[in-house]
Amino acid sequence: MGTRRQGALPPGAPPGTGPVPGPRFSWALGLLILLATSAAAQEVPATGGALGGVGLIEMRNARFRPDATLEAGAAFRRNGQAWFLSAQPLPFLETTFRLERDSAFDLKLRLWQENAWRPALAVGLQDAGSGGGRAGEYLVASKRFRSLDLSLGLGWGRLGRGGDLPNPLRRDWAPYPGSLFRSGEVALFGGLEWSLPALPTPLGPMEGLRAKLEWSGDSPGPSRNAASRVNLGLQWQPNPWLDAGLHLLGGTDLLLRLSLRTDAARQPEPPRPPLPMAPRPAPGTNPAGSDPAALKAALRRAGFDPLGFRLDGAEARIAVAGGPYANLAQVAGRVARAVQPHLPATVERLRLEWRRQGVTVARLVLLRQAMEAAAAGPGSAEEVLAATTLLPAENEAPRGPSLSWALEPRIALQLGNPRGVLRWQAGLATTLRIGLGGGVAVAGSLGQAVAGNLDGAPPSRSRLPHVRSDIALYSQAPLSVPTLYAERIWTPAPDLFARLTAGLLEPMFGGISGEVLWRPAGRGFALGLDLNWVAQRDYGPGFAPLGYTAATGHLSLHADLPVLNLYTLARAGRYLAGDWGGTLEVGRRFASGIEIGGFASLTNATGRYGEGNADRGFYLRLPLQFLGPATDARAIAVVRPGPRDAGQRLAVDNPLWEVAREGRAEALDRGFMGFLR
């Protein structure tokens, strides 16, 4: 008798019976089913790690938050605490700033996304560029199978102290310079994250629970204060903004993690329902001499300061200032809807002049019929954009007096000091700007400290002039006058802007500041030059100078990048401490007006005087148009590893790029949906 092959029909099997799967075939079939069904689990949101950013517990995985996510939180354990701020500025890039015993900056880059057959893969740097106690590099893969997410990675540096493998990229083998991925041995790390079913409670089902098990790449022992490399955790993520976790590290330490997050792409202001587009008045019911007073009253109700109105045949010329919108398309759409019932039926074109800080930043021609079609349904915002003509910026309407104010939150941070203490001060500032006509204005602000410990920070030991490192001394007076100055902003030629400011320019310096900016409305770049002579202000509430003076100025290039609303800014010149060098900045602006970016400055003082290799950090800018009528106020948070004196620039209220940038074609294209909002 012959031997029956595995999988062949057994003797006497009825017709139509398939082969009997063997053990190997069953295992392979099960794996294929798991792989095929794993893609459906990709919508499970990622969770945060103990050190900030997305991860398992102490180790990272290859997961990322959604694009434009901002997250801030803290982790508490027996021997200390860590504060962290994470951002997802690009879909494939995660950045984390952490303050523990010292400051640290982490980067994680997605190499590719998970699909039905392959895992997600990411590479990262922990404590990048500083060589701190947690410095290390890693390569990690993650694959999800229904409710189970598995991760496996290789760690170098602090993440490789487990020493499971020899380093294939050790220094004497690697053909490239540097120390990344080349220190010591390599350790394996990994773990799993299990999405638990809803837990019944007396208050209802508790959803969003995750159980975590991790094998750390770090070694146990006294230096890590752990008995083993195994970490356990329970994470709770009940909604899109809260992430809380309780973890047992190495069998010895409990760690509590809590963070809050938000979506930077969402509009931060209270929703304003669109103004209805009224029907065009019937012919003859609204003569050519329509009531300018009624039209201006309608513009005021829409939040604008009307500056001028004139009818010129089939064209209505309208000039407005300010407004609670930083989006040019939304300004144009709101103005068009506000004046619609007050224009004669024969008007077909709206010629709009939009002014900010006393200077015209945009002129455009809007077709009335396109707006009516978009509001009624047959048309669209894209068709309104296609029918709109953007003109070079220059003043047309006469410039009379104006008034704007805002009540703004202010927060100052001192991060990265040697003791690892988070120093901060929160307060309020009232700003006032009085336009005198002709682009001339007087402006100032009054600040009131509310809470914080920044005034108790240790004194600066910088060997450079203390142009920024004495921030704690400037925080001791509860009531302050951050700014008080006279200013003129004007356009000497189409798309050429100029500014001259004199007085108390910022909380630490007063003097004279001049700037010119060429900003072609239809191009994706701008060139600027600023020159300043300043004297350092007294620490107290008085106005007396301290005796330090400086001449400072920079040549700047602003450029739009072709993807993801990214922009870049390059500066070169002399900084406040007398050092010479350059700054490179890359940022992203979302439709909400929120901006996230990073910067690095390198000067002839960095690397000397105890200033480190470079001044670097990242920033968050949040528009605050809802805090006052016709205000351009923004909250700005800058996170850098400590207050440094090298690479520091003057911070005037109205740099021309910030005044004029929203009057360009790029801004109109980016926010074109604002025509209908």
Image (cartoon, rainbow, N blue to C red):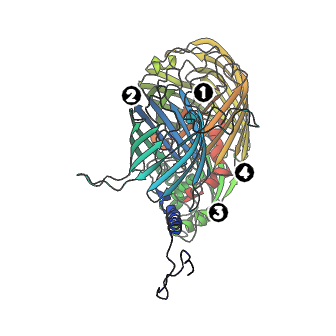
Q: Residues within 10 Å of mark 4 (few under 14, many from 20)?
A: some
Marks 3 and 2, the one that precedes in the sequence: 2
Q: Where is mark 4, residue-wise? A: 522
Marks 1 and 3, the one that precedes in the sequence: 3
Is residue 265 something one can see in this rendering?
no
Q: Secondary structure at mark 2?
A: loop
Q: CA distance from mark 1 to mark 3?
A: 40 Å
Q: Where is mark 3, residue-wise? A: 314
Q: CA distance from mark 3 to mark 2?
A: 75 Å
Q: Residue at x 68, y 41 (%)?
A: 568
In the rendered structure, which amino acid carries the disc numbered 3?
Ala
Q: Where is mark 1, residue-wise? A: 486
Q: Residue at x 49, y 86 (%)?
A: 16
Question: CB of mark 3 within 8 Å of CB of mark 2?
Answer: no
Marks 4 and 3, the one that precedes in the sequence: 3
Which mark's residue is nearer the viewer, 4 or 3? 4
Residue nearest the viewer, comparing 647 with 505 = 647
Question: CB of mark 2 within 8 Å of CB of mark 1?
Answer: no
Q: Is residue 578 left or right of residue 303?
A: right
Residue nearest the viewer, comparing 29 with 205 = 29
